[in-house]
Image (spheres, coloured by chain):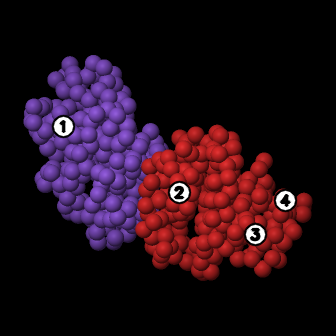
Chain colours: A red, B purple
Amino acid sequence: MRSIEVCFSPELIHLHEVTGKLVVVVDIFRATSTMVAALAHGVTEILPFAELEACRAMQNKGYLIAAERDGLTAPGFELGNSPLAYTDGAYAGRKLAMTTTNGTLAIEKSKGAAEVLIGAFPNLQATVTYIQSRDLDVLIHCAGWKGRFNLEDSLYAGALVQALGESHANREDGAIAMESLFALVGGNLATYLSQAAHAKRLQNHGIEADIDFCLSLNLYDQVVGVSQKGELRIV
Amino acid sequence: MRSIEVCFSPELIHLHEVTGKLVVVVDIFRATSTMVAALAHGVTEILPFAELEACRAMQNKGYLIAAERDGLTAPGFELGNSPLAYTDGAYAGRKLAMTTTNGTLAIEKSKGAAEVLIGAFPNLQATVTYIQSRDLDVLIHCAGWKGRFNLEDSLYAGALVQALGESHANREDGAIAMESLFALVGGNLATYLSQAAHAKRLQNHGIEADIDFCLSLNLYDQVVGVSQKGELRIV
């Protein structure tokens, strides 16, 4: 029986066994949602960076450069962290270098896993189908907010546990808790999350449309984002 | 409006502001439940220790000594970590030195708080009444299991958030999530927690009666456990 566990913060990842597992990195508001949108709309490759300077330097190599710090586009970058910037296909065929506050760190700290996927609500079912084709235990790695638990990443974890169902029936405590919580509030996700700290911060930035996108289920049936050797691509 | 937040592990406490807050330390299976039982049944003072040797040395000073490691009584100690050892009043009037796997660490890491309380289901309402008499923001510090999220401590956090209600209406994400989860499963706590990893480990030790005690609500209406200068007492 395959197992499933949730790590609620990159600050706790050293307490989990990553090696040999399929790790799903989640940063719903908005890094992994944006990555999935970019890949779904034709971006061919995403390189995640922890630091602004290394990310910016990729512009000279023909990369589109995107950077977000505290919810805003970092100065000197072409794009911030909005998934809706990609949905009209304007960047199809481009390669993207990207850095975000929480999400990139979680990807970096997932090194050593058998596979690393990029989780988001818009491609939940595609990700589930892919995971079920693999004979691997699953670790959901929530980016959290500045190292702390956050509601949106945790609820995605619950949605994934629920959708995987019996294929990953060996659930540790965090998976049990979040599956129950998603079963309770998943039908009303936007309303429930409007209480959450991060959603409130984003509302202050006037990006309600981004939030709606990030909470939309199964827009992309065929898109699974996989990190291989530090590059994200569709498989 | 007073705020309430949940820290799910001592490994995350450095990301929370402790100073000036009322911290409630929780280790439901079984450290804080045992501490509350001991105080309710006449133990006059509890000194928590991180290390076995320092705890054992207190025997020469007239202390009853208790130590648990991985769910079992440590060799050479009079007591382990069972709340039921105290409920017949056999240790009334004694002072207790105690060390446990997860609970003691969470108490140590709460230093700097305005006040530190010991949380357990058997004195939930007494703790709520005390907290509501104080004009302080609340941080619930879950001991977790070896640094990871656990279900029973998190559900106590949810119970406390729910019971405090409007007096602490400014809730961060962990408090929102756990209040919802407790509202869903609190009426069926023992059944729900029988899935949890720690409860399964304890069942293997044959201590179902301990588990029942630890999940019993409001046995002690007047007992509030407070840590002051490293000593736990009733206030």
Question: Quick check: A118 left or right of A63?
Answer: left
Is A232 situated above or below B168? above
Which numbered mark, 4 or 2, is in the foreground of this view? 2
Q: Which residue is mark 4?
A: A58
Q: Which residue is mark 2?
A: A165
Q: Give whichever of A197, A4 is nearer the camera.
A: A4
Label 3 element class: helix
Residue B131 x %, y %: 24, 59
Label 2 element class: helix
Marks 4 & 1 on one chain: no
Which numbered mark, 4 or 1, is in the foreground of this view? 1
Task: State the image quarter where residue A65 is shown.
Answer: bottom right
Distance from disc 4 to disc 1, alpha carbons, whole Å, reads 64 Å
Viewer can see residue B160: no
Which numbered mark, 1 or 2, is in the foreground of this view? 2
Q: Chain of mark 3?
A: A
Point 34% across, 40% down: residue: B103
Residue B136 x %, y %: 30, 61
Point 50% across, 47% down: residue: A170
Distance from disc 3 to disc 1, alpha carbons, whole Å, reads 58 Å
Amino acid type, callout 3:
Ala
Question: Quick check: A109 left or right of B213?
Answer: right
Label 1 element class: helix
Q: Which residue is mark 1?
A: B84
Q: Which residue is mark 3?
A: A40
Sooner in the amino-acid sequence: mark 2 or mark 3 = 3
